[in-house]
Amino acid sequence: MVPVKLVLWDLHGFHDTWNGVRATMFRRKSAIIFVLDLETMQLDEIQHLLDISASETVSKRVLVGNKADVAAPGNTEEAEAFATGKGLTYFEASAKDHEVLEVVFGNP
């Protein structure tokens, strides 16, 4: 088994003054997991984070559509299309079913 260092950041909010701080969070990372609330669909914030992280060499970028159980009709399809268009691996999850970690981290 290989030890893995997992660092989680909650970057919610569109704060331009955080751009420098956010950019440093993406440096020297093997993977980045972006979590999208399928209820509110703030794709502009995900795009902003993708733009900030674009200059970093990251082997895997993942988009997790969360709150799949309460998503408005069409939101899951829009999120999946967004992910596909950006070259992101896409998963859907709901914190209610306790399988979120297995869905995201249990898939090679």
Image: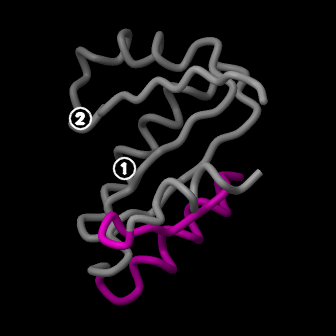
Splitting the image into 4 quarters, where does residue 48 fall?
Answer: top left
Q: With respect to residue 90, does 26 lie above or below?
A: above
* Spot occupied by residue 105 in the image (x, y as percentages of width and height): 61, 49
Q: In what element is the residue under mark 1?
A: helix
Check residue 14 in the rendering and tell me which mark sits there, or answer none: 2
Q: In what element is the residue under mark 2?
A: loop
* Spot occupied by residue 20 in the image (x, y as percentages of width and height): 38, 10
Q: With respect to residue 107, does 18 lie above or below?
A: above
Q: Residue, x 33% and y 64% (percent of image)?
A: 95
Marked residue nearer the N-terminal end (2 or 1): 2
What residue span does the magenta drawing correspond to?
72-97
Q: Residue, x 41% and y 86% (percent of image)?
A: 74
> Which colour scheme appears in the figure?
one colour
Q: Residues within 10 Å of mark 1 (few under 14, many from 20)?
A: few
Q: Are marks 2 and 1 in contact (CB under 8 Å)?
A: yes
What's under tag 2, amino acid-wise? Phe
Q: With respect to residue 65, does 43 lie above or below?
A: above
Check residue 44 in the rendering and tell me which mark sits there, or answer none: 1
